[in-house]
Image: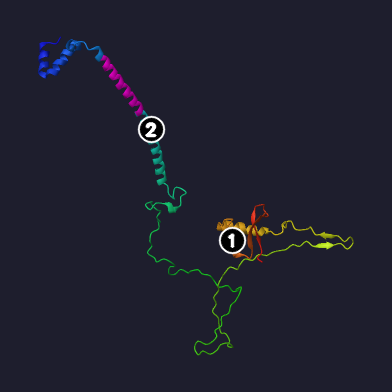
Amino acid sequence: MPTSYEIYQTYLRGPAAVLRLFKQALGTQAIYGRPDPGMQQRTIENLSEEIDALQSQIVRLKEELRDTRGDNNWLRQRNAELEALSTKDSHNSSRPPSTDPPWRKRTRSLRRPSGKRPGGQVGHPGHTLRLTHKPTRVVRHRPKQCHHCLSPLREERSTGVERRQVIDLVPIRLRVTEHRAEVVRCSRCGRKTKAELFPESVREGCRTALEWWRVRSIYMTISCCPTRVLPRRCENCSAARFRPARSRPPSGNARPGWSRPS
């Protein structure tokens, strides 16, 4: 039991403190009496309903948490992909320089200005094309009349020339070699015999030689020309007209055929 001093100190703290003191000393039943059995049952039922509602809410929240975690993982992965994509440019990937963003740091030259004007400097010997002593063709340009007195210069003798040369590539021409197997009639038996001694390289009615394929391979390698564009390029630089027909080349690979223009 509490002492008189404890009761007095509790009284000074207020009625609520006095009720708590009596509950601790005498118990709840001594103050409020025995609880009603029906009220206890209703309280239990209400608490059970609240527990069921809370459990359902916990299950729903767990499902939402699982979906939220899945979305969070997907967003993290997508963010990592976008960050990796934004950090790639023509320097650390196979992307062309035209796809680089404008704010991307570009490579700067380490050269410093020298203060000199661009181009050939003073004292530089220079290099240029030199005139050849044996030109392929000479075109003579003769004045028709004197620039001073307008007299005709047809019969006058030349005293000098000024030479200028133009270097150009000649058009490519194809050389066609025709092999003919002769048919001879025998005077003894009257029957015909055809020669069958064609060279090993002559198998079809019309085909290109091995040298042509060597030139074709070199041209495709140097100029990076695709196979479908090669016939049109060859038509522009030769006298042959290519057709879509395909045959077997000397090496066994398929190639477009060609025919001479009519």
Compared with 53, 211 (above or below) is below
Q: Residue 164 or 200: which is nearer the viewer?
A: 200
Asked if residue 54 lies in the magenta stretch, the reply is: yes
Quarter occupied by the N terminus: top left
Q: Does residue 127 appear left or right of residue 202 in this picture? A: left
* Total marks placed: 2
- Which is nearer the N-term, disc 2 or disc 1? 2
User: Of circles 2 and 1, which is in front?
Assistant: 2
Q: Quadrant of residue 139?
A: bottom right
Q: Secondary structure at mark 2?
A: helix
- Identity of the residue drawn at 15% across and 15% down: 19
- Identity of the residue drawn at 28% across and 16% down: 44
- Identity of the residue drawn at 27% across and 15% down: 41
Please provide percent x and percent y for residue 84. 41, 43
Q: Does residue 52 appear left or right of residue 146 in this picture? A: left
Q: Residues within 10 Å of mark 1 (few under 14, many from 20)?
A: few
Residue 232 tag number: 1
Compared with 69, 247 (above or below) is below
Disc 2 marks which residue? 67
Q: Residue 124 or 220: which is nearer the viewer?
A: 220
Q: Amino acid at mark 2?
A: Asp
Specify start and end residues of the magenta stretch as a single range: 40-60
Compared with 191, 22 (above or below) is above
Could you tell me what secondary structure mostly forms the magenta stretch?
helix
Looking at the image, the residue that sits furthest to the front is 38
Q: Residue 144 or 70: which is nearer the viewer?
A: 70
Q: Quadrant of residue 215?
A: bottom right
